[in-house]
């Protein structure tokens, strides 16, 4: 008997909804593409490249547009014999200093076996090795540092690299750096000298609105999803949800892919609105759980206190009242409680994670105070908590109170 059977009635090419898929066509970014092309023009003309800094929230097409344009650029400059272009792309997500980025670059450029170790050299030595490799390649070299914000303030490379020619560290190689960041604050926190050089050309990618997301989904669905396997209105719905939340094409595509998987598991012939709803709450829950995994026990207890207040329909709710609830939960779990001040810090962290929202209330002579409520669906929050906290009977009680109050 077969255990596995092929299910391919919903998807035609599911990989086309995945993270690594590179679209042949970019929708809705004409203006950004034009500006980007203008910044890259010196490469075609044979001059020194601009340094470019690209920023925008996650999922707004920064990586996709960069990959697309650099592919086109490489194809098109092949027609000019006097331009010898190399593109080196590095995702810096797991690298948290200039040093690590420089080591990765050196190792990318060296033949297998010639890699250097990621510790033990002085930083300037690694930079020097990098210059040697770049000189060996020569010509025009574009170095793409994606998600470069993860290097934080250890940004010396971003100062050195664009100046390497001026400082006589490079001679035959003309290097341009393309820095991509999900975080605009990264730009502001850069050393002003780095800002001047790296951000020679700045491109901002705004979030997508619902019609833009719908177009992106449509063009991707044509490749990824079988004919007639999407109910009318489903793409529009995915687009609306993602636009309201983040404006991220990644979120919209994730919703569609998961909705398709749910449809497949339910043996439906097409993706329906219900499947998108189910996908939405599952993704929401994943997001909340991910945020919660990062929390300490006290962060979790502070959150559970807000959840408990929400079950009683008592949110938004002041820190003092949340604190009382928190004390009760600490008592029942046999955990020593923290001072109110520290719990307040946990509440602000939860707000930063997008799990809570806060309101500032003015109360005359007694100064301002905050009140908090859940910023995620009640059900996702309590589900996630029951996975990470061992407080079964308390959580059960909260659920019962919530269902009495019709809190869902
Ligand atoms: P970012 O790098 O800004 O986080 P990505 O470029 O990785 O975002 O885009 C996220 C997903 O959405 C990718 O699958 C990408 O192919 C797709 N995407 C984003 N913008 C567009 C667009 N304008 N046209 C087509 N696909 C897009
Ligand atoms: Mg990206």
Image (cartoon, rainbow, N blue to C red):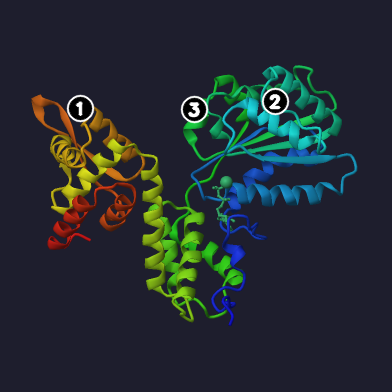
Mark 1 = which residue? 339
Q: Given contact means CB atoms under 8 Å apart, are the residues at marks 2 and 3 in contact?
A: no
**SS class of the residue under badge 2?**
helix
Q: Residues within 10 Å of mark 1 (few under 14, many from 20)?
A: few
Q: Which residue is mark 3?
A: 188
- Residue 54 lies in what quarter of the image? top right
111 is higher (above) or lower (below) than 214: above
- The residue tagged with tag 3: helix, strand or loop? helix
Q: How far from the left and from the top, in percent, is residue 99?
A: 64, 25
Q: Is residue 360 visible?
A: yes
Q: Residue furthest left?
A: 365
Picture residue at 12% right of the left edge, 62% below the top: 404
Could you give the CA–CA distance between mark 3 and mark 1, rounded to whole angstroms? 35 Å
Residue annotated with mark 2: 161
**Marks 1 and 2: which is nearer the front?**
1
Q: Is residue 26 above or below residue 36?
A: below
């Amino acid at each position: 008997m077969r255990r596995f059977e092929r299910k391919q009635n919903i998807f035609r090419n599911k990989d086309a909804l995945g993270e690594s898929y590179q679209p042949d066509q970019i929708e809705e970014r004409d203006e950004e593409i034009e500006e980007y092309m203008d910044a890259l023009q010196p490469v075609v003309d044979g001059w020194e490249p601009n340094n470019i800094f690209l920023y925008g929230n996650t999922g707004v097409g920064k990586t996709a547009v960069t990959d697309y344009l650099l592919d086109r650029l490489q194809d098109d400059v092949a027609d000019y014999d006097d331009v010898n272009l190399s593109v080196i792309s590095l995702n810096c997500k797991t690298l948290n200093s200039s040093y690590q980025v420089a080591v990765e670059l050196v190792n990318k450029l060296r033949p297998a076996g010639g890699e250097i170790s990621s510790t033990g050299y002085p930083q300037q030595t690694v930079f020097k090795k990098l210059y040697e490799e770049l000189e060996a390649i020569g010509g025009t070299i574009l170095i793409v540092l994606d998600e470069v914000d993860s290097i934080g303030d250890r940004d010396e490379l971003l100062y050195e690299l664009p100046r390497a020619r001026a400082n006589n560290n490079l001679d035959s190689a003309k290097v341009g750096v393309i820095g991509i960041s999900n975080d605009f604050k990264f730009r502001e926190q850069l050393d002003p000298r780095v800002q001047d050089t790296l951000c020679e050309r700045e491109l901002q990618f705004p979030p997508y609105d619902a019609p833009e997301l719908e177009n992106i989904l449509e063009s991707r669905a044509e490749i990824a999803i079988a004919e007639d396997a999407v109910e009318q209105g489903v793409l529009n719905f995915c687009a609306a949800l993602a636009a309201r939340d983040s404006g991220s094409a990644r979120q919209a595509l994730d919703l569609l892919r998961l909705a398709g998987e749910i449809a497949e598991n339910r043996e439906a012939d097409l993706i329906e609105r219900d499947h998108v709803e189910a996908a939405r709450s599952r993704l929401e829950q994943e997001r909340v759980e991910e945020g919660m995994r990062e929390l300490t026990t006290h962060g979790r207890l502070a959150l559970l206190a807000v959840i408990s207040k929400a079950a009683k329909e008592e949110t938004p709710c002041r820190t003092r009242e949340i604190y009382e609830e928190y004390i009760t939960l600490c008592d029942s779990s046999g955990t020593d409680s923290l001072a109110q001040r520290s719990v307040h810090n946990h509440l602000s962290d939860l707000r930063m994670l997008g799990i809570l929202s806060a309101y500032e209330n003015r109360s005359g002579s007694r100064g301002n105070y905050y009140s908090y409520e859940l910023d995620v669906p009640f059900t996702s929050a309590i589900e996630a908590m029951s996975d990470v906290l061992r407080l079964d009977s308390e959580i059960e009680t909260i659920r019962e109170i919530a269902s009495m109050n019709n809190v869902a």
